[in-house]
Image: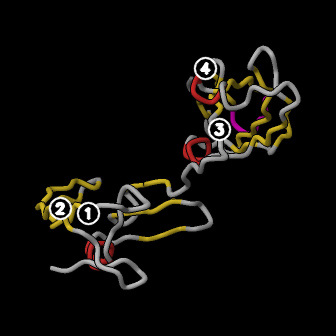
Amino acid sequence: MTVFFADGKKLHVVVKAKVFIGLGDLELSYNFYVVKKLNHPVLFSLDFLQMTGCQINLQKKCILFNNGLTFIPIQTFDSSMLLLKSAKHVIVPPHSKAIIFTRLTNRAVSRFNSENALGLIEPFVTAQQRGLCVARTLVKNSQTNQFACRVFNPWQKVCKNST
């Protein structure tokens, strides 16, 4: 089978492999093509997406498979983004807000090292998966590598955020 980029150029297929996949309660086998020079680690074809009952939710930035039983985030990093993690385990009670302390990951520290560097904390899909809403916050580089971050739990259940 010949595989093409969206612009019509041929992709170099390295190997075709039949892969068995489990998506929640759905188990299936599908032929995947390993190709060179993709900009993304994986691309799904329309027949695969239809076969698995795929629903793409751009508002929630996720892909649902198998009637919503399997959730995959579609938000990805680009080269200008740095990752923050909570500095300690946090539990946010239902219908509550909290200020939590976050820190840059080790790899991100070296990229955000200028004394006057400014950054914008924005929600990432993993916080949403845990049920937390994250407020956007403008921060200045901190010598302690700790940044205050405001979160809100709008749900009727406790939300947990682990380090």
- The picture quadrant where one finds residue 83 is top right
Q: How many marks are shown on the rendered structure?
A: 4
Badge 2, how many Cα within 10 Å: few under 14, some, many 20+? Answer: few
Badge 3, how many Cα within 10 Å: few under 14, some, many 20+? Answer: some
Report which residue position mark 2 lands on: 14
**Real-space Cα separation, disc 4 to disc 3, in angstroms:** 20 Å
**Real-space Cα separation, disc 3 to disc 1, in angstroms:** 29 Å
Span colored in magenta: 93-99
Label 1 SS: strand
- The picture quadrant where one finds residue 149 is top right
Instruction: Judge depth for marks 4 and 3 and give the one in front.
Output: 3
> Amino acid under label 1?
Val
Report which residue position mark 3 lands on: 82
Image point 43% across, 61% down: which residue? 39
Kindly check if marks 2 and 4 are in contact, taking CB atoms under 8 A apart as contact: no
> Amino acid under label 4?
His
State the image coordinates of residue 128 (x, y, percent, origin top left).
61, 47
Residue 35 marker: 1
Q: Earlier in the sequence, mark 1 or mark 4?
A: 1
**Real-space Cα separation, disc 1 to disc 2, in angstroms:** 5 Å
Badge 1, how many Cα within 10 Å: few under 14, some, many 20+? Answer: some
Report which residue position mark 4 lands on: 89
Image point 59% across, 60% down: which residue? 60
Instruction: Judge depth for marks 3 and 1 and give the one in front.
Output: 1
